Amino acid sequence: MKKVLVTGGAGYKGCVLVPKLLTAGYAVVVYDLMLFGSDGLPKHPNLTVITGDIRDIPAYTAALKGVDSVIHMACISNDPSFELDEALSRTINYDCFEPMVIASKQAGVRRFIYVSSSSVYGVSEAPEVTEDHPLVPLTLYNKYKGMCEPLLFKHQSPDFVCVTLRPATVCGYSPRMRFDLTINILTNHAVNRGVITVFGGAQKRPNIHVDDVTELYVKMLEYPDKLIAGETFNVGYENFTVSQLADFVKKVVEEEFPAKAPITITTTPSNDNRSYHVSSRKIFEKLGWKPRLTIEDAVRGLCAAFKDGRFKNTMTDEAFVNVKVVKKLGLK
């Protein structure tokens, strides 16, 4: 049985990814600070859950025993999180990255999958932003994400296959839910306030369903070395403006909750100017991979979860917003 270590494996994507890995027959090690707990993870004989800090390289190295592959997702995530202490952001998202890569290679790991971000492109008027587009970081988050990429490829070798993924904004239901991501925010407000507030509106944002992106992470463990070694792939599906996303959410929520219609859309200025139209043509042409699920699927899935009572106090509970939890815990 092959063993994969997932950093950040108890987070929003991790709680969708880990069950997929277990179903695919992998032994899984989740290595996570557990800022949000681990209740979203399943109980399984092939799952080991370790509370650990990726900055603690000896502890991380100990967790690598017998590990064949690493999927590295752990970070202070999403741009608003950099309201936090800059030193914290740098130490977690950048300083420890290359030491982790070196420790992984020395421990005999054969494949390292780095989850970067499509936000590294910042602002672009290009009709199709491909993987060779210049990186234009607007925040420390996307700056450090981009700076880590060449550090990984320094260590690419026939025995240590390295690949970077740049996912679009993720959306949809997870057992460890986040309501600080565009589609999830809009849906939460539509369902619970009857009002969607659009910040800006003209910014173009690519999106990807959490089920699709985590299925790709599983596949990345299986593709032949020659197809992915040293490669960078955009991972997105639908590109729309924030205003268009709000219109989609309004339509679906009104269909799912007719009593809440009409839902109002208001617009206000935004200081988040990230805007880019990401092309995922390369990953389709090289690997034959493309997503299956739409923005509408994500919104309907969230509506189903609201109907089932899987969420409580989503407008007030800080546990659904990463930056608020990190601030509250005073992480250093």
Image (cartoon, rainbow, N blue to C red):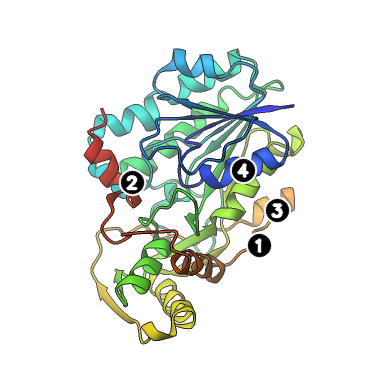
Q: Residues within 10 Å of mark 1 (few under 14, many from 20)?
A: few
Q: Is residue 298 visible?
A: yes
Name the residue tied to disc 1: 292
Q: Nearer the viewer, mark 2 or mark 4?
A: 4
**Total numbered badges shown on the rendered structure:** 4
> Which sits in the foreground, 25 or 282?
25
Q: Sequence order check: which comes first, mark 2 or mark 1?
A: 1
For residue 19, the mark is 4
Residue type at mark 3 is: Trp
Cβ atoms under marks 2 and 4 closer than 8 Å: no
Q: Sequence order check: which comes first, mark 2 or mark 4?
A: 4
For residue 289, the mark is 3
Q: Residue 270 at what x, y percent from top left? A: 25, 64
Please tell me whether residue 26 is drawn above or below residue 187 in the rendered image: above
The residue drawn where x is 38% and y is 74% is 243
Secondary structure type for disc 1: loop
Q: Residue 33 at what x, y percent from top left? A: 40, 30
Where is residue 245, by image quadrant?
Answer: bottom left
For residue 322, the mark is 2
Residue type at mark 1 is: Arg
